[in-house]
Image (cartoon, helix red, strand yellow):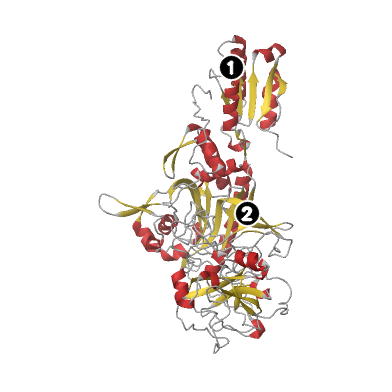
Amino acid sequence: MRTSQFPLSTVKETPADAEIVSHRLMLRAGMIRKLAAGLYTWLPLGLRVLRKVERIVREEMDRAGALEVLMPAVQPAELWQESGRWDQYGPELLRLRDRHQREFCFGPTHEEIITDLARNELRSYKQLPVNFYQIQTKFRDEIRPRFGVMRAREFLMKDAYSFHLDDESLEQTYRAMYDAYCRIFSRCGVRFRAVQADTGSIGGHASHEFHVLADAGEDAIAFSDSGPYAANVELAEALAPPGDLPAPGEERRLVDTPKARTIQDLVEQFGQPIERTIKTLVVAARDGGHAGNAGAVPGEAARDGGHAGNARPEVLLPSGHVPHPWGPGAVPGEAARDGGHAGNARPEVLLPSGHVPHPWGPGAVPGEAPRDGGHAGNARPEVLLPSGHVPHPWGPGAVPGKAATPGSGSGLVALLIRGDHELNAIKAEKLPQVASPLRMATEEEIRAAVGAGPGSLGPLGLPIPCVADRAVAKVADFAAGANQDGKHWFGLNWGRDLPLPEVADLRNVVEGDPSPDGVGHLSIARGIEVGHIFQLGRKYSAALKATVLGEDGKAAVLTMGCYGIGVSRLVAAAIEQHYDERGIAWPLPLAPFEVALCPMKLDKSFRVREAVERLYTDLTAAGIDVLLDDRDVRPGFMFADMELIGIPHRVVVGDKGLDSGVCEYKGRSDPETILVPLGEIVPWLVERLRPPAAG
């Protein structure tokens, strides 16, 4: 390709509304142009990169045995109403009517459409398993589209859906898709991690996210520094601190604290160690907010009741972003506006469904607690009960083994977190007594139920149900609000001063926590979610009555898996990992061109023109994707453009080099140029660009 036929639309200025590196560089390099909020036109340069990602995805999906289809982007409301999602989805679903006033939507995902296809086309178990995929435009009406194509309203996605007779067959395809995704991201030249993930709003048995590691990532991922464990922070289990509860060392005392409304105030004004402070976060209760499990047996783990992966009606889009649960103005990835106790509220959940991770080991039963210690995503792997009974936090008369009934009927639940920890919203809303989606109580609700404001709450004498984090259960001599404005208790101890409430894993893991699999400690990194795979189960097939005749001649509901990749997002994610102060530094498989051919004074030197034309022809014949810059521009301008758009290899031909029979070569990340004989440059580049396969 020649620049005279392929105009470059580069700009020097950094766009004012571009917040992250990939957005700025895609605009400056002339890859995209903004049409409206969250809507972008892909220019020829950007489209070449997008098509290269598509090709890699398509080749690996075909290699894995998936069959390509293409489904309509506009979908009839009837199918969404049949699955129940038409009313559940919320304003992110772009709804429209045709001239006959029939309702449709612009699909953010295609579960209903593919399930309808399957129920009409699949008749017998002999047609299974089958895996359909498409690369299609999706639309999700983001309340705040940002970060360019990283979080656009319209996006390109590969979504695949597999159909099976049983879970064993689903597991086999799930493993094949996991391997295919690893090949896809490796071929794209990005550093990535596959992590166990929460299943989100649809439910299911297993889930893995694929994250490109980059500082701009909106997800935090936790991984062992010496073992294979990796999980999204929202899912990673925080183990209970080792050892027994320390013995009391202080007397309980009530202290006036008129200027202490936050944990940090207590630390700074009273010298209280932050790890011996307890913050009390009040949230809306589910169906009245009874604390504890009805019929809980002393000394046994709490019965989960199937709450892992319960529905979150407002989330669920293959684009990959889950709405922040505290209201339209909340910013994903930032602290909640009510005081920052939101934790990691699923800022980015990519892909067309969501389901609970399941350990890889044999004999794992979907829907049951993992057999590897409970860290694979069960909502409440264990509940610690003090002294073999079930205490209740709101006064005498509570009966061990029975659900407690709070006298206030406030519909609120208190969650107790150590002062230096943050609440994990996903873990919290999986508790059976907490409303889903999680909602922080307002100050008015708190004052009506407790008689004090949010800055003065604590577990002693609190008239609403409590659930304590595991780390809280191991704290002695702690400080907490006294449920009176301007007063705090110091020197509180479980057992001596108040009973220990129900205990659960409520917090985000932090750097240095022990790995849940017992191997090493956790490190935390930022990740951009570019892929998500789920063992979906029978949610959609049961709702849409998608069945086939089984081997016994009876109708069997199909079991499904779904597998998504954000194709357009992957382009931006690659840039976030491959750039420098001069522009993009594409990994070779994604580069719009492999070689930039830059002639000096092309319009003035016949020798240069002749040599460059011959070299261009030879490179093209060798199968190398080359861009010949035949513009009449200064060398510095030409080089700056080639570096900005990120072409990995540059060859310069000029009269001075021709006098010596050489040309100049420079790799995009090389500090210096080198001289290569002009007659050897083509095979020399071929060897670099197409190294022989090992073995």
- For label 1, the residue is 613
Quarter the C terminus occupies: top right
In front of the other: 12 or 173: 12
Q: Amino acid at mark 1?
A: Glu
The one nearer the camera, 331 or 298, is 331
Q: Element under label 1?
A: helix
Residue at x 53% of width, y 25% of height? 1
The residue at 50%/41% (across/down) is 18
* Secondary structure of residue under mark 2: strand
Checking the image for residue 643, the label placed there is none
At which x and y percent is residue 491? 66, 77
Tell me the quarter of the picture where residue 371 sits: bottom right
Tally of marks? 2
- Please indicate, yes or no, whether residue 470 appears anywhere in the rendered image: no
Q: Residue at x 53, y 49 (%)?
A: 565
- Within 10 Å of disc 2 (Cα), the crowding (few <14, some 14-19, many 20+) is many
Res 333 → quadrant: bottom right
Q: Give neighbour class at mark 1: few <14, some 14-19, many 20+ (Cα, 10 Å).
A: some
Q: Which mark is residue 194?
A: 2
Q: Are marks 1 and 2 in contact (CB under 8 Å)?
A: no
